[in-house]
Image (cartoon, helix red, strand yellow):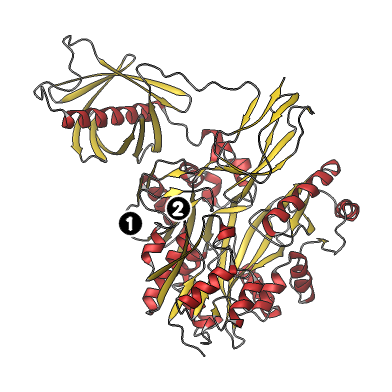
Amino acid sequence: MKKIKRILIANRGEIASRIIRTCQKMGITSIAVFSEADRNAPFVAQADLAIFIGESSPNESYLVQEKIIEAAKKTKADAIHPGYGFLSENSFFAKKCKEENIIFIGPNPSAIDAMGSKSNAKKIMEENGVPVIPGYKGDDQSEVTLQAEALKIGFPLLLKATAGGGGKGMRIVTRADEILEAIHAAKREAKNSFGDDELIIEKYISSGRHIEFQIFGDQHGNLIHLLERECTIQRRYQKVIEESPSPIMTEDLRSNMGQAAVLAAKALNYDNAGTVEFIYDDKTGDFFFLEVNTRLQVEHPVTEEITGLDLVKMQIESASGIPLTISQNEITGNGYAIEARLYAEDPANNFTPVTGKIHQFKIPNIEGLRIETAVQSGSEVSVFYDPMIAKIIVWEKNREAAHDKLAYVLQHLICQGITTNQAFLSSVLANDDFRKGNYDTHFIEQKMQLDKVDNLEENDLHEAAIAATIFDWKNREESRTILKNIPSGWRNSFYQPNIEKYIFGEKEVEINYRFFKNKFEFFFGEKTITTRLANFDHEKIRIEIDGIQKDFSVLKFENEFHVQSSSIGNIKLIQADRFPKKEKEKIKGGYEAPMPSQIISVLVEENQKVEQGTPLLIISSMKMENTISAEEEGVVEEIYATEGSNVEAGFLLMKITT
């Protein structure tokens, strides 16, 4: 047994902050590592010590094992906590830590090795009586064999990279004529993400739920599970909302799945924190093993909230050689917990990641709310890392009460300056099927109208425009140095109103108003809205609209107004120029980068004829791949993108003549 006094955290963002918090609670010195992009990040300032390890790209910093080990030696760390992602499931790194006499806070390397390949993991589980999905997991990876095995299994089926997770290297195939292209795409993505293009093929469960069990072991052979988490609400194979208990869980099902999870852990001689993931078939009631995540999960706070346990503390104790102090029959769930992941992404554009500055980030102060975040007001969301901004966790006595509280938090959370999935999360919480627990892995594509998530009712849009106008008026009023006794925007003709125009998405709002006797009158067609300014503090204004007072958070940057209220959420209004600027000329047939990206592959050549829908390029941003396809038929005239290069949003990738 070795006492841990100093822990180096080989990670970044919210999980680094989370680990630091437990270190402080345990009286352990926390040491952060940081890249150039993270130099001023909150987690760096929160740690007792922080050490620079390289440039912004993970391949030059957080993924460089030698730099992490050297940083641990330099700061005299007893142990390294890898968090999740990066090096957390790298058995070679875990072994290297041991060789350097540094404790790796995670499971033993052999368990990581065993689960590092999905095909090997399935084989081990089959041999130990854990139910697995029918499929192919052989060494022969030739296209001929993979295609033949796919045809044997039948459709729909799932291609899955054996070396990774997070939806990378995964393809659903529904027809025989799709199989070859899907194999190529899955192998390419797996190779780029994990350096290994091996695939397994599984029967695809068309109506399924993802349910995972938190497992925990110590170095003395003790193994328990800490109940389940429902993780079915996903986009791009990545979780968005997690809750516990699962709405479909019965005591018998929990007992059976929990026993299977512990059986899986015993097959690996598992120690420390891990998760056994299952797919539950809604049609048959059967469940099958998917994988073991040999690390702490992103959604671990859900389990902590219902059990009252600190999983990071348990990890540190287990890595120190301390036996588990709790047995299976002592594990009980108290109440209900739900977690929603706030991402910098555009749900209406296939959840495309976005970058930019978060001008203001404010969290409501509510009992039972827990926020795990990597940002603060002024933080930049960069192209280099995962676009998750925060995890919003709520505990309540039951599912309905927790959903109500989370919905309220999402209404009042302020995240201004960047596009997020906040409105999407609110719409999920408002969905009747979600509220009733009637959902499967296809919930988002089948039940959500993503193009309407950010739509505003006309009255809400008018109120946002009113708030922006009064905010601007008040700032002008306070900054004036001459003729202060004349109201801002005064006209010598009382009947001639002031005019402002705002653009919201594809809508234009014209607002006519006048100010007299300490009140505003706003005119929208034949409708008149009487408004008074109740309070103003440069970021937040309270206005009275037709006798009802409401709070609005407003920020202005050049001609952009970022407006938030509980009824409209966080939106951006563009103030139209009084003298329109000449727009950037759109290049006919030009294809531009939709976001800052790396060019993974150029799929066409100059002078090649393409049809509508022909894949042109594959780009990667924030660890996710996107394919840009031809919008109409034509001939590739010029290609400006080079494989491996990094480009900014708006970069001209290629031209196609039609």
Image position, residue 53 (x, y; %): 50, 64
Crowdedness near tag 2: few (<14), some (14–19) or many (≥20) residues, C-alpha within 10 Å: many
Q: CA distance from mark 2 to mark 1?
A: 14 Å
Given contact means CB atoms under 8 Å apart, are the residues at marks 2 and 1 in contact? no
**Residue 334 numbered mark, or none:** none
52 w.r.t. 642: above or below: below
550 w.r.t. 241: above or below: above
Q: Amino acid at mark 1?
A: Ile
Name the foreground residue: 498 vs 46: 46
Residue denoted by label 1? 366
Residue denoted by label 2? 403
Say which label, 2 or 1, has the lower sequence index.
Answer: 1
Name the foreground residue: 150 vs 378: 378
Name the foreground residue: 267 vs 380: 380
Q: Kindly state the secondary structure of the residue where label 2 is placed.
A: helix
Q: Is residue 442 left or right of residue 388?
A: right
Q: Amino acid at mark 2?
A: His
